[in-house]
Image: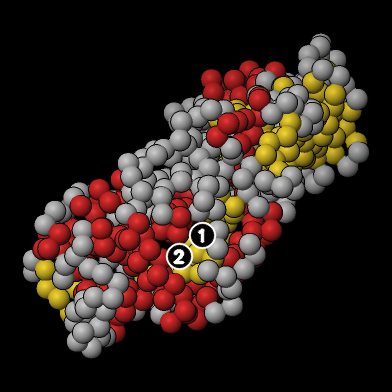
Amino acid sequence: MRSGAKVAVIGSIFTVVAGGVGYGAYNVYSGITGGNQEATTRSAAAPRVAGTGPVTAEEIERTAEDFLVAWAKGDETAAGELTDDAATATSAVAGFRDRAHVSKAVITPGAPVGPKVPFTVDATVTYKGRSMHLRYASELTVVRGAPSGLPLVHWAPSVIHPALTAQSVLRTGEASRPPVKAVDHAGVELTPEKYPSLRSVLEQLREKYGSTAGGRPGVETWIDSTAGGVPDRTLLTLDKGVEGKLRTTLDADVQAAAERAVKRYGESSVVAVKPSTGEIRAVANNRKDAFDAALQGQQAPGSTMKIVTAAMLLEKGLVGADRPAPCPKEVLYQSRAFHNLDHFDLPEGSTFRESFKRSCNTAFIKLIDDVGDDAALGKEARDVFGIGLDWRTGVSTWDGAVPAETGGEAAAQYIGQGTVQMNALDVASITATAKHGSFQQPVIVPRDLDDRPIATASRPLEPSAAQQLRDMMRATATSGTGASAMAGVGGDKGAKTGSAEVGGQADSNSWFAGFADDLAAAAVVQSGGHGGDAAGPLVASVLRAR
């Protein structure tokens, strides 16, 4: 492109300029919002001709310039004909004016890089008397059209805006929901700037509860997506509207601690829950992508699953916290070998409490035949711990799964491997149930906000089993595999460590579950090694913030 070339809007009139001087005697156009052409087309421009082979530098410059001029003046037909998908491009250029309500635009091309031409757009968006600038950069690619042989802009939605896809359009208008001021349970404001892990949560809360929170919608320019599950993205706010107020169950102090905690490790997540009520106090992630793994992830939870397995064995009377439970180095179950970390064993006569706090796999596997029911673990997870009961937390969550298995896969489930799938929320809830003695479905907004149905488990933990389970978790936190991580946590505390081997990873995932008084938390660190080393300190720092 010529140095300093612009496709510009001056007042309500478009003109092509270079270095402040018009291109010869051509092209002064009416504004993008309509009107009559005020000058003729190029007097010196030669007709476009077909060619063969790669597009030339001259063809790239000429085609890009012609397209940008047509776009800037709002001539969607001319712009479309300069692309290799005229119908789609024509509609998109018209939508830039009519849907996005762009009244003025300055489009400034940069130097071509091969067939690609970068450019910047300074668009003036005008809606119901309000105007603001939307500035961004994009690029186009010039190709040889087939079968015409003409140089054409290869059409892609990203030409109009880099965030656009085939399933989205640029739109300006009244927002679908009013802005929402989300606050924690004590009234402290929660913003994505201060608590970045909550961005997805806050967007969902606005979408779901914005119309009932007492606010007034503003005016926005946004990426309007028709793809299922893809959230809209606001690009420009012309009118903020009036905020509604939405009270959540989160705790600003605990959330801040969770945000700090996950910064220690990439690909980590942590969730905190109040055992007596199920209220979610914190949700945090540190990931390369925007996926909310803390609430929606699906991974094997490793030995944190032994909280559920131990509860089942205790309720069936197959073990007692202070009864002997053999812990050999290795056991074989239906041709599948299972061993303990570093192949350790415990002396003969060691109790089930010792096996639990040392996270002895073989002590659990040896009891499968005595259970005599491959579905028993899944029933315990569902009927007592509420796993898989379609939780209505107020935002999207994955609520865990312990599918029916047989043989070696059923045995793997006892120690949180195989097909068991959990996330930090699920394991935090399991820990909360163990602490409280009965399942309280996690929630992030109060139930009375929308009178939604809340999942309930079939029954509480049998009291004796619940007491023994808590005692074993307390032992783990004070003298077992969780003792180092929990050393600085005061109050009534308990823990369970876990490591989950995941195919293709050099290191296992690190899991940790813990409670302190009326707060339970769980964390996972991908490729983090052993539970007490990586995930443990994350949970401990969150519990200390209670």
- Residue projecting furthest to the top: 36
**Can residue 26 be seen from the camera position used here?**
no
**Can residue 74 be seen from the camera position used here?**
yes
Specify the quadrant that holds the C terminus: bottom right
- Residue projecting furthest to the left: 334
Q: Nearer the viewer, residue 431 or 526?
A: 431
The way the protein has been coloured in the rendering is secondary structure
Rendered view: 522 above or below 91: below
* Mark 2 vs mark 1: in front: 1
Question: Residue 90 in the image: x percent, y percent?
Answer: 60, 21
Label 1 SS: strand
As drawn, the label of residue 520 is 1
Q: What amino acid type should be assigned to the residue bearing mark 1?
A: Ala
Question: Residue 365 in the image: x percent, y percent?
Answer: 19, 69
Q: CA distance from mark 2 to mark 1?
A: 8 Å
Q: Residue at x 46, y 46 (%)?
A: 440
Specify the quadrant that holds the N terminus: top right
As drawn, the label of residue 513 is 2
As drawn, the label of residue 129 is none
Q: What amino acid type should be assigned to the residue bearing mark 2?
A: Ala
Q: Residue at x 41, y 50 (%)?
A: 438
Q: Residue at x 54, y 53 (%)?
A: 274
Question: Residue 310 in the image: x percent, y percent?
Answer: 29, 64
Q: Nearer the viewer, residue 119 or 179?
A: 179
Q: Nearer the viewer, residue 445 or 153?
A: 445
Rendered view: 62 above or below 190: above
Q: Residue at x 26, y 79 (%)?
A: 351
Q: Are marks 2 and 1 in contact (CB under 8 Å)?
A: yes
Label 2 SS: strand
- Left or right: 374 in relation to 528: left
- Left or right: 255 in relation to 328: right
